[in-house]
Amino acid sequence: MRAVLLLALKSAWARRLTLGIALVAIALASALLLAVERVRSDARASFTQSVSGVDLVVGARSGAVQLMLYAVFHSGSATNNMRWESFEALATHPAVDWAVPLSLGDGHRGFPVLGTSAAYFDRLRYGDRQALTFSAGKPFAEVFEAVLGSEVAAQLGYRPGDHITLSHGMAELGPEHADKPFTVVGILAPTGTPVDRTVHVDLAAITAIHLDWAGGAPLPGLAIPAEQVRKFDLQPQEITAMLIGLKSRGDVFRLQRHINGYRGEPLLAVMPGVALDELWQTLATVEQTLFALSALVVAVGLAGLTATLLAGLNERRRELAILRALGAGPREIFMMLTVEGLLVTALGVFLGAALLAAGIVTLGPLLREYGVHLALRPPAANEWGLVVSILTTGLLASLVPGWRAWQISLADGLTPRN
Amino acid sequence: MTHSVDQAIRIKELTYRWPRQCADCLAISHFAVAHGERVFLHGPSGSGKSTLLALLGGVALPQTGRIELLGQPLTALSAHARDRFRADHVGFVFQQFNLLPWLSARDNVLLPCIFSTRRRERAGDPQQAAARLLTHLDLAPALWQKPAAELSVGQQQRVAAARALIGQPGILIADEPTSALDAPRQQAFIDLLLAETAAANAALLFVSHDVRLAAHFDRTVALAEVNCAATEAAT
Amino acid sequence: MNAQVLLAATLICGMPFAHAQHKHVHGEGRLDAVIDEGSISLDVELPLDAVVGFERAPKNDKQKAALAGAEKILNDAATLWQPTPAAGCSVQSVQVGMPKFDGEHADIDANYVFHCADPAELKAIETTLFKHFKRLYRLETQRSGPVGQGAQRLTPKKPVLVW
Ligand SMILES: Nc1ncnc2c1ncn2[C@@H]1O[C@H](COP(=O)(O)OP(=O)(O)O)[C@@H](O)[C@H]1O
Ligand SMILES: [Mg+2]
C-alpha cells in the first residue's frame, strides 16, 4: 500500500501542470472562503473591542450606526454637532460616572484629529476592558500639545518633541492650520482599535485653531498668533459627540430614554454594544450571501478537481493496467486516485491559508482605516471547521475519480481496451 | 488425479465468457506449460489470447474449470490473494506502453520489487539485479536514468522484459511483445527473451498472431487447437 | 474588500435607531435586560394583541377572562423567566402594568427583578413567554451585563438570552 501511495505521488508530480491548475483554483477558493470568515469575525471583534467600557455614545440625532461609525471609528460621514450645554448637563447627570467630549473634523496627513479632554486617556477602555497606556510621553496638558496613536507615530516617524500642524478637514491637502503648530508630548501603546490611527489634542485646541476661521477658511485680515489664543475663551460652542460611563449599569436604559427625549435639542444616545449587534443582525444577510457565494466558489474549485482527475483517467488507463499487472488490486487503484484528490485539496487549503496570511499582511493596513483589525494568527475554531469541511468535500469529490478508476481497472484487467 | 507440481501452468475444463456476452470466449478442456518450458501460443486477433492471459493473471475468473499456476489453484484464491500471487510469481510483457513514462528505465525495472517482497528478496540486491538484467538485455547504462518516455519502443520493450524477469518469477507471460517492433528487431528481442527466461529457469508463454515468430520455442500451440469455443463458433 | 462592502452596506442602510422611538409592531415585544452583580432586571413591553389577541377594551366576558388570565401568567415571574439554575436566582419583585385602553395601541409593560446567590454562574435566561402567548413571535432584546452590551432577537425557536 505504501508503495502504491508513493507511486501515486510520483505520478501526480508527473502531471503537476494540470493538477497545479486545479490546485490554484482550490487555493484561491479556500482563501476567499477563509477571508470572508476571517473578516467577518475579526471585524466583529475589532469593532466590539473598540467600545468596551463605554455605556452610551451620545450625539445629535441621526442614525445609531452613523453616529457610532463617526464618533468611535472616525469613518463614514460627519454627523451634526451637539451643543456644549447639553454636554455639560449630561456630564453632571447624577447617574453619570464620567463623560468625555469628542470633537472631530480636522486631520493630520490623512489621520483623523480628535479633540477631547485628558480624561479620555483614563476612561477609555478597549479589548477586554484594558486601559490606554503610553509607550512614550504623557497626556496633553497644554493647548498645543498632541498625543499620537501608535500607528500615526510609527507611520510618520514622530517622537515626543516633534512639531506637527493640523489640516482643516480630513483631506490630505485641506487648508493648513500652519500658524498653530502642535508639540507631540505622548505616544500611545498599540491597541488594535481606531485609537492607533488618531491624533489626540485638547478640545480647547480645536477651538483655538479655528478662532480666526469661519466657514472652513481663514478669515481674511484676521490672524491670531498662537501665543495670543489663551486670552480668548476656548470653551467650544459645539462638539461632535460624547462618551458616557455610568455609575451603575442598571441606569443605562433609563438614561438612554432620558437623552433620547432630551428637551434642549434632539439627541441620540446609543448603547454601543447593542448598536453593533443590531448592525451585525442587519448585515447577517449580506454576510450569509457572501459566505454562500464563496462556499459555492470552493465547490466549483473542487468540481474542477474532479473533472481534472476524471479527464486524466482516460490517459492513465495504461498506467492503471501496468499497476494491475504488477499486482495492484482495484482497491489500491481506488485509493491511489482518492488520495491524489485529497492531497491536492489539502495542499490547496494550505496554500489558501497562506494566501490569506499574505493578504492580511498586504491589505491589512488598508482595512485598518475602516476600523477592522486583521491579525496574523493561526486559524480559530470556526476556521478549522471550514478547513475540515473543505477537506471532507474534497474527499467526496475525489471518491468519484477513485470509483471510476476502480471500474476501469476491473473492466480493463491487464489490457486497456479502446 | 495427477499432481501438477511439475507444471507451471495447468488449465482444466475451463470456460470463460466476458460479462454481457452471449457466447463463451474460451472453452479449454486441457492446457499445460511445464516448468521452464517456452511455449509459443498463436491465434488470429480476437481469438481470445489476451483473455486467456487475463485469466492466468487472475484479474478475471473463469465461470467453470480450474487454473493452477505453479501448483497453486488460482481459482481457489480471493481476488486480493490472486493480486498478490500475480505480483510474486508472474512477469508480464505487453505489446506496447509497458512502462510508467514518468519513472526512469531502472525504476521501472525495480517496480516488481516494490510490489512483491518475495521478488525483492529473490533479487538479492535489487539495484544490482536491475543493472545485470538491463546489461543482459543490451541497454546502455547511459539510458538507465532516462525517463522511460524518452526511450525508443525497442528499448522500452527490453526494459519491460527486464522488469518481468527481476526477482525470478516462475512464469513469464508475453502478449504480442514484438508487434510494435520492426521486423529485424523482432527476432532479436525474442532471442533475448528466450535466453533470459532459460537463464532464470522460468516458464514462458509467448502469445502472438504471427506464426513466423515461432521458430525458436520448445513448443508451438495454436489457440484454436485447445479452444473448443472457437471451433464451436466456427461451425 | 469585504469590510468595505460591509461598511458601504451599513452606510447605505443607515440603520434606524431601534428602541429610541417606540414603534408598535404586532407580535413583536421588547425586552431590556440589565444583569448587574447579583441582580437581574427585566423590562418587558408586549403588544396586547400578541398576548390576548385583541387590542381594544374587552367587549365581553370571554375577553375579560382572557385579560385576567394573561395578567395571572405575567405575574408568575418564576415560570416566565428561568435564569441558569446554578446561579440560584429568586424573584424579588414583579410589576405588571395592564393597558388602560386610552390610545390607539395597547401595550403591557412589566418589570421583573431577580436576585442571584451565585452571579458568577449566571450564563443565560430562558423565557416561556412564547409558550404562553402563541401570537408573540419575537422579542427584541437589549442587554447590558457583565460581558458588555448586546442585542439579541428571541424567538419561539430561540427563547434563550445568552451572553
Ligand atoms: N474487457 C472485455 N470485455 C468484453 N469483451 C472482451 C473484453 N476483452 C476482450 N473481449 C472480447 O473477447 C474476445 C477476445 O479478445 P482478445 O482476448 O483481446 O483477443 P486477442 O488477444 O486474441 O486479440 C473478443 O471478441 C473481444 O471482443
Ligand atoms: Mg490481444
Image: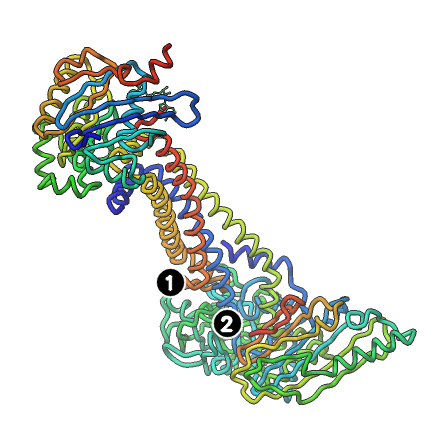
Give the residue at x 30% y 35%.
Answer: B75
User: Could you tell which of marks 2 and 1 lies nearer the N-terminus?
Assistant: 2
Image-quadrant location for residue B115:
top left
Name the residue located 70 percent from the left edge and 76 percent from the top edge. A260
* x, y percent for residue A204: 54, 79
Left or right of A182? Residue A56 is right
Query: Quadrant of the image for the C terminus of chain A?
Result: top left
Q: Is residue A379 above or below residue A340?
A: below
Quarter of the image for residue B54 reads top left
Looking at this view, is A336 or B61 the one in front?
B61
For disc 1, the marked residue is: A378
Q: Secondary structure at mark 2?
A: loop
Horizontal arrangement in the rendering, residue A299 relative to residue B193 (left or right): right
The image quadrant in which ligand 1 is located: top left
Q: Chain of mark 1?
A: A
Which disc is residue A50 wearing? 2
Along the viewing direction, whichever of A253 and A289 lies nearer the viewer: A289
Q: Is mark 2 within 8 Å of ligand 1?
A: no
User: From where the camera sits, is residue A234 visible?
Assistant: no
Tell me which chain the residue with mark 2 is part of. Answer: A
Residue located at (36% from left, 77% from top)? A136
Residue B222: % across, % down: 24, 15
Task: Give the percent coordinates (x, y) of residue B29.
Answer: 29, 22
Q: Secondary structure at mark 1?
A: loop
Q: Amino acid at mark 2?
A: Ser
Where A267 sits versus A333, above or below? below
Residue C117 disc label: none
Tell me how far mark 2 sits from mark 1, CA to CA: 22 Å
| Residue type, mark 1 in image | Pro
Name the spot of residue A303 as percent of width and height, x first.
46, 41
